[in-house]
Amino acid sequence: MDIPAIRYPTSVRPRVCGLLARQIEDLAPLTLLHAPAGFGKTVATVHWARSMKEAADVHWVAAPEPGTGHEPSPLPGALWGRIAEALGGEVSRGALGSRLGGAGSLLSAAGSRLSADPRPWAADGRQQVGGHAREEVERLVHGLRRPTVLVLDDYHHVTSGDLDLGLARLLETNSLLHMVVLSRRFSALDGPLIGGRTSAVLVDERMLEFTEEEARALAELYGTDDFAQIEERRKQAHGWPVVMRSVVQQLAEGSTPKEITRVLARLGKQRFDTVPTASGRRAVLAIVLCPDASLETLAEMLETPYTELEAVLRELEELGIVQQSWWLDSPRYRCHAGLGDALGAMARHEFGPEAHAMRLKHAVELSRDKPIAAVAHLFEIGEHGAASRVFTRHFLELAVPGSGVMQLLRGLSDAVLYEYPVLAGALLLLETPEGDTPDERIEQLYQWLRARVRQQLRDGEHEPTPPLMALLAVAERMRGDDDAARRLSQHIESRLERTPEERWDAERFTAPLLYRALGLTGLVLGDPAMAERNYRRAFEVAGRFENLSTQARACEGLAATAAFSGDLLAAERALLRRDALLDGAVPHDRTATLDRTASLDRTASLDRTSQSERTSQGDRTAQGGHAERPLQRFSWAHDVLARMHIARERGRIGEAFEALQQFDAHPLKRVEQWPLLVVAEAQLRHLSDGAPSALEALERRRQEARGGFVATRYLRCVMEAHAARLHIALGNYAEAERLLDPLPAAHPDAAVTGALLHLFTNRYAAALDAAERTSERVAERSPALSEPQRALPRLRVENGLVTAAAHWGLGERERAIDCFAEAGELAERLGNHLLLACIPHETLAAIAAAAREAGRIDLTEAVDWIPPNIRAEAYESLTRAELRTLQSLATGQTVGQIARSLYITENTVKFHLKRIYRKLRASNRNEAVARAANMMLLPVRGGESR
């Protein structure tokens, strides 16, 4: 059969042609196109086939359809006959006629239809005739001397296990043979044909959807330029080709938008009328009413046996009316986007008063895996109480900026928000970082939330109170009241601990969420023990109910907590555990705890394939459609924080910057733990580009976060202390001191950084005294450090290194080696050797060598591995007079001009310059100015010194 003609104007789509092959050399042995009717697979293949005619022999074979006077069983045999005719022409037809006797008349000159006389296909002769045709095809394929393409159209009519296997083996006979198979359903291709040894390319309906560029090309072909209208319709219909052609045709004929809407409604009705059975039409309307309904829910709603409904839905898929997706092992169905609006009124009329109850039942069931869609349905039908319960169970999935939930909440009346404080709290959480929400509205939402929590506490209500208190704790943190947030969190934790065993089933959704909220509270308030404790509890409670997604989120929280604390091996193990959960490698175990990860290799490297790549690959299912990975990236901030720290320590800078790209995909100001991310980026840029780049990034990110979540006091101190460290690395000790002065002396990061400043300015006794005081503070039971033995091990390492370096500077060699060995052993247990870089590198190398000689610990290799950009040098501080002289020098003034501008003698200027050159280790004024600029000792643009 020749390549069929196209009955209407249509544009060539190079993108779709490229999915098959741009050159015959690139064509896979087997290319499979599966899509429902109306997706343009035949048209696209016709365009492609025509482009290949010069490079290959292209034969189009239309599979025989049932209902042409024959039973379904002989159809595969008839296909072999058609293939033989296509490959051999008249000569082959004659040969077949002589070999098949009376059956040869079936292969008429037209070759595209079976004879209406069924007698040659009597029971005894069916397989025999098909077998002769197959033998002839095999003989012809063996003799191919030129690239040959067989296009098998409407393959779903004839597919069978034997036919699939025969075609798969045929492809192995001659490498010059290629097949392009078109089918309306994936199940037609899920057998030996696709499972054989021959490589295959799969093209599905999503790949056939019109892009914006393709829609424009089609419009130009029809002579219309209303691209805005076309693009709007394209998005509404998800690029469905049959709708796009209808829209463009109507615009070319001068139709108005309303007329086009009516035409599309008629098109939808026409498509609906193609459904042959009443049960099928009723199923379509139920799906219109309840998009993404599961097979189980539809069977219950329609009171139809499961297997019978499954067959009906398969037929609807082939007609292109219904689309299937997968969630775990459960299929979900929705009407194609181009038809939903057209059939909505019909669906509501069909089910009448039952429609509301159907939608409510569907939304509750949908909330298990698609809570955002469920909430939208519940708001639409006015079921705010049910929506509030969904928020309580899935708060962290719903209260996500950019998910569309804020727009849904903004559409609620004040009366509804006051009546359902969880909804008010969610809106408060989403509105606060926006920056454009009036302060009065933020205060109003806060007061409503606070009033309802107090009311419920007075009324003695149990279940709703902990979630509301958690929301209020977040609100208090956002308002800067860290103490109130801490008290509320401790109260929630206490109440959860007192939860009776018999209530755990009722708390299966809320308890893990609350534990995770408490974990985040501990992280941002500087209580890593609280963070770890509650993330572990979230993991364990979720494990009791086999909730893998919540366990994965808890693992990410644990990884972030460990990474911030400096325990990179623990962070790595948590992420490996998370990945195992996501990949389904961890069996369900109600008694599982995270301690089982101890069996993992402590030195195992993380999979370099990003989670977004893994989830985007998806799993093809045998039943059709595309499998959705149910456990995708949840807590991007936790994941990025942990991965950046781990990759930086392992020397995988490219991987660390890949994680950093998430900053651009998610507004930083909408993340409560943004200061931790900013510090992590500064550490990465310090390693890759130097301290000036790190300081620039730190300041830029702080500006980006303005107007969003207010950093807690603890995290503000962490950021300021890190900025001071970067200035110490540059030798700008005056600026470091200025940044440290306002910070509370009890803050661990500020205390260790203060000790470092003493060390770098050669005040060894002061450094030793500060380090000893810091060590005592770390061991105190303060509100921020409830479990001292677990408090920020990275600071214990750094404090121990400061102590060692101070003893070394004071000539106390043995004490220095002892302190260094203790700190080094802890760094090794953490898998975090970059912590060694905090003290001057020259001193570090000397102590490491001495410790090795003494047989205490050998870290010389780790010290030598420290990248140059973060190797610290100790510079002698410049006096104020020297700084003024240096700043005048940088303007290009001569010695005389400097003397006159500073009202000092030229000899004094020369004295200052000599000391400046020595302190900056420069040999001339150009080197001194360049080094001072790098050390940020010179005024920035605008005249103020940094």
Image (cartoon, rainbow, N blue to C red):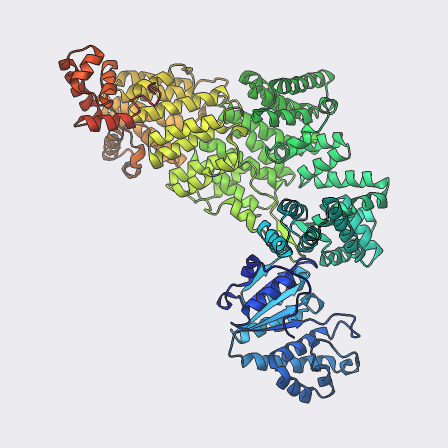
Q: Which residue is outermost to the left?
A: 907
> What percent of the width, then of the height, locates residue 711?
50, 23
Name the residue nearer the viewer: 518 or 634.
Answer: 634
| Residue 923 versus residue 164 in the image, above or below | above
Name the residue nearer the viewer: 675 or 532.
Answer: 675
Q: Is residue 219 left or right of residue 766?
A: right
Q: Is residue 903 left or right of residue 129?
A: left
Name the residue nearer the viewer: 57 or 282.
Answer: 57
> What percent of the width, then of the height, locates residue 857?
29, 34
Residue 210, can we see it? no
| Residue 505 versus residue 796 in the image, above or below | below
Q: Which residue is outermost to the right?
A: 353
Name the residue nearer the viewer: 548 or 218.
Answer: 218
Residue 832, quarter of picture: top left
Q: Is residue 804 left or right of residue 157?
A: left
Q: Quadrant of the C terminus?
A: top left
Q: Is residue 561 left or right of residue 798?
A: right
Q: Quadrant of the N terminus?
A: bottom right
> What percent of the width, then of the height, locates residue 293?
73, 46
Residue 203, can we see it? yes
Residue lying at 70% horizontally and 48% vertically, measured from the top left: 337
Residue lying at 66% horizontally and 84% vertically, measured from the top left: 93
> What percent of the width, then of the height, locates residue 173?
54, 76
Residue 699, quarter of picture: top left
Residue 829, quarter of picture: top left
